[in-house]
């Protein structure tokens, strides 16, 4: 499979997931607090290289991949994601400096479920969401217990692995996954015509 085809498949998965998350959030009325971003400050968030390919590919299209890669190398073992902006500015949309191309867990966390030992879905969310809206949180938990819809984390990771088992299975710390994704994209286009930047 050509690299852009792999990227397209991952992006399609992100789009499907976005719709599924909207469905859950619309029904549960749960959402992040404006300007929060606390979950991005967690150390050692993990992603597979495959999830970071769209990020690397779009950086390459903007002719920024090589420069970003050089800057990232000395920081690749830092525990906090390098895409996290330290402060919100007037024009920033959030703490993530590449929100559109963030990996799966950054999309799923807060509004999805994992299966417990009895194979029942359990909502994976944060203390802030629970405490800021305890009524809707409780309603969502009860709804899930009774078979209500919630995106299942394992489902999206399984779809990701199906796209490319080699790149979609092993989990790395997010900065390392970015490094590897950039290396793949830079190597691939070192002797091919670069894709045009369509925005
Ligand atoms: S990729 Fe973006 S959303 Fe995910 S941890 Fe980094 S800054 Fe946060």
Image (cartoon, rainbow, N blue to C red):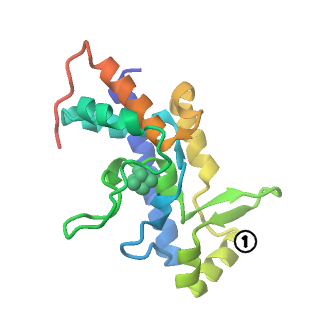
* Closer to us: 66 or 194: 66
Q: Is residue 136 visible?
A: no
For image coordinates 60% across by 66% down, the residue present is 149
For image coordinates 44% across by 37% down, the residue present is 76
Residue named by callout 1 = 145
Looking at the image, residue 63 lies above or below residue 121:
above
For image coordinates 76% across by 61% down, the residue present is 120
Q: Position of residue 156 (x, y in %)?
A: 56, 47
Q: Is mark 1 within 8 Å of ligand 1?
A: no
Q: Position of residue 128 (x, y in %)?
A: 54, 76
Q: Quadrant of residue 195?
A: top left
* Closer to us: 148 or 184: 184
Residue lying at the far bottom in this picture: please name it. 135
Mark 1 nearby-residue class (10 Å; few <14, some 14–19, many ≥20): some
Q: Quadrant of the C terminus?
A: top left
Q: Quadrant of residue 146?
A: bottom right
Looking at the image, residue 105 lies above or below residue 24:
above
Q: Secondary structure at mark 1?
A: helix
Q: Position of residue 49 (x, y in %)?
A: 48, 34
From the viewer's perspective, tell me whether residue 31 is left or right of residue 140. Answer: left
For image coordinates 47% across by 44% down, the residue present is 78
From the viewer's perspective, tell me whether residue 17 is left or right of residue 90. Answer: right
Residue lying at the far right in this picture: please name it. 118
Q: Position of residue 151 (x, y in %)?
A: 57, 59
Q: Quadrant of the N terminus?
A: top left
From the viewer's perspective, tell me whether residue 147 is left or right of residue 39. Answer: right
Q: Is residue 25 visible?
A: yes
């Amino acid at each position: 499979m050509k690299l852009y085809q792999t990227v397209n498949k991952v992006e399609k998965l992100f789009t499907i997931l976005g719709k599924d998350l909207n469905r859950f959030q619309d029904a549960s009325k749960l959402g992040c607090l404006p300007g929060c971003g606390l979950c991005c400050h967690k150390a050692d968030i993990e992603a597979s290289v495959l999830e970071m390919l769209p990020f690397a590919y779009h950086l390459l299209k903007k002719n920024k991949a090589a420069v970003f890669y050089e800057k990232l190398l000395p920081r690749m073992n830092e525990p906090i994601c390098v895409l996290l902006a330290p402060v919100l500015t007037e024009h920033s949309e959030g703490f993530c400096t590449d929100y559109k191309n963030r990996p799966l867990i950054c999309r799923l966390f807060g509004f999805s479920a994992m299966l417990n030992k009895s194979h029942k879905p359990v909502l994976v969310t944060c203390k802030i969401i629970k405490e800021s809206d305890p009524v809707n949180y409780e309603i969502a938990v009860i709804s899930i217990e009774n078979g209500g819809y919630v995106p299942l984390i394992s489902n999206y990771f399984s779809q990701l692995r199906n796209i490319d088992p080699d790149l979609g299975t092993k989990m790395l710390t997010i900065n390392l996954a970015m490094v590897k994704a950039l290396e793949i994209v830079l190597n691939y286009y070192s002797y091919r015509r670069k894709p045009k930047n369509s925005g």
